[in-house]
Image (tube, rainbow, N blue to C red):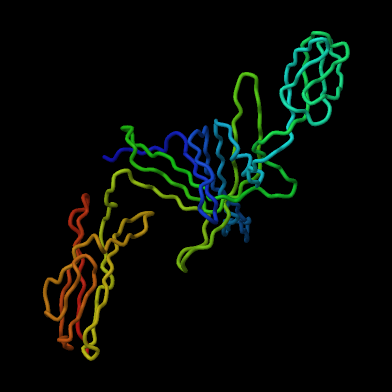
Amino acid sequence: MANNEFLVSVADAVLRDPNTGDALAFGKANITSAFTLTTAQTDVRGGINNPLLYTYIHDRVLEVKIEQAIFGKTILAINAGQLVKNGAVNVTQTECVQLTGGDGLVTLTPIGDVTVFLPDGTIQTVTPSTKTITVSGGGSQKVDAVYITSTTSDQITIESTTPPSVVDLTLIAQVRDNTGVIVDYLQISVPRFQVMGNYTLSLAANGVSNETLDGKALVVASADCTTADYYAKVTWIPVAATAIPISSIAAIPTKLSFSAALGAATKNISVLGIRGGIYANANITTSCSIVKTSGCACFSVGLHTGAVAASGALAADSVALITVTYYDPTSGSLTDIVNVSGTA
C-alpha cells in the first residue's frame, strides 16, 4: 500500500526579473504562502421550470499571497514598483542633548533650524552654529533635539503613478509521505506575477512587523500550437529519480512502409507510456528496448532510438517484425509490436 502524501509547512519564494531572469529576492522566512485558483460562472437556463442547460466557466484568476517574518527593502520596493536607490538624502534626526549653560552639541550637522523639546513641555526653535545649539533658559537640562540632516542612505520613493512591479515568481514547497520522508518538491512557477501593491507596515509594542506580497498571475503566451496560453506551471520534482508508473505502452505507428522505388530511407517509431486516469501519456521511447525480432535483413532498428532504417536492398515484398519492450516495476514487462513492410 502506497504511503499518503502531504504538502507541509510553508513554501520558499524566489523572485526574478521576468525579462532578464536576474534574481531579486529569495524568501526563506515565510510565515504563510497561499496559492488560490478561482473562476466565475454563467449559468444558461431555459425551458419549462428553467432547468440548468449549461454552465460556462470563465474569468480564471490565479492569486498568490506570501507573508514573511523578516523585514527588508525588497517587498516594499516591488509593491511600489521602484528600485532601491542609494545617495545623499535628507532625513530627520532625533537625539538627546545635555545642555550646559543653555548650550549643547548635536551629533550631525543640521540643515536649517533645530527644534528643541524641553522637560517642562515647552518647545523652542533655534538656529544652530554648525552643530552647536543655544536654548534660552535651558540651563543644564537634558532636552530632545529634532532636525533635518543629510546622510548617505538607501531610499525608496513611493510615486503616485508608478504601478507595482511584475516579477517572475517561483514557490517551492515540500511534499512528505506519512513516514515523514520528503518524496517530492512542489514547484509552482508563475512567469509573470503582477504584484497588487498592497502593503501594510503594522508595528506593535510587543511584536514585530510582518511583510506581505500578494498579486495575480498574468497570462503568458504558449511556445507551441498544442498548448494554450497559461498562467503557471506546477511541477512535482521527485527527490529520488524513479520511473513513472506505466500500465501499458503504445508504439506509434503500428505499421511502417518503405518504398522500394525510393531505396534507402529512415523512419521513426515513438513509444507512449499509458498512465491512465488524469495523467497524460508520456514519451518513453529512449527507455524501451526496440529490436527486430524477425524479417528481412534489409531492415534495422536503433535499440533505444526507434529509428528504423531500410537499406538499398529493400524489395517490394520485404517484411519485418519489430518488438518494443518496457519494464515497469508494478505492471511488469510491457510489449507492443510494429509491422514493417516494403512497397512497390
Q: Residue at x 44, y 50 (%)?
A: 234
From this view, report whether residue 271 is shown above or below residue 115: below
Quadrant of the rendering where the C terminus is positioned: bottom left
- Furthest toward the front, the residue is 130
Could you say which is closer to the camera, residue 318 or residue 70? 70
Name the spot of residue 127 as percent of width and height, x first: 85, 25
Judged left or right of residue 165, residue 270 is left
Judged left or right of residue 77, residue 221 is left
Image-quadrant location for residue 296: bottom left
Q: Residue at x 31, y 62 (%)?
A: 283
Name the spot of residue 59 as percent of width and height, x first: 60, 55
Name the spot of residue 304 as percent of width and height, x first: 21, 65
Q: Residue at x 65, y 43 (%)?
A: 85
Could you say which is closer to the camera, residue 285 or residue 197? 197
Q: Residue at x 73, y 16 (%)?
A: 96
Could you say which is closer to the camera, residue 282 or residue 50? 282
Name the spot of residue 177 as percent of width and height, x first: 34, 36
Could you say which is closer to the camera, residue 282 or residue 147? 147
- Furthest toward the top, the residue is 140
- Furthest toward the right, the residue is 136
Judged left or right of residue 241, residue 37 is right
Q: Across the whole image, how many numbered discs are drawn on residues?
A: 0
Quadrant of the rendering where the N terminus is positioned: top left
Image-quadrant location for residue 251: bottom left
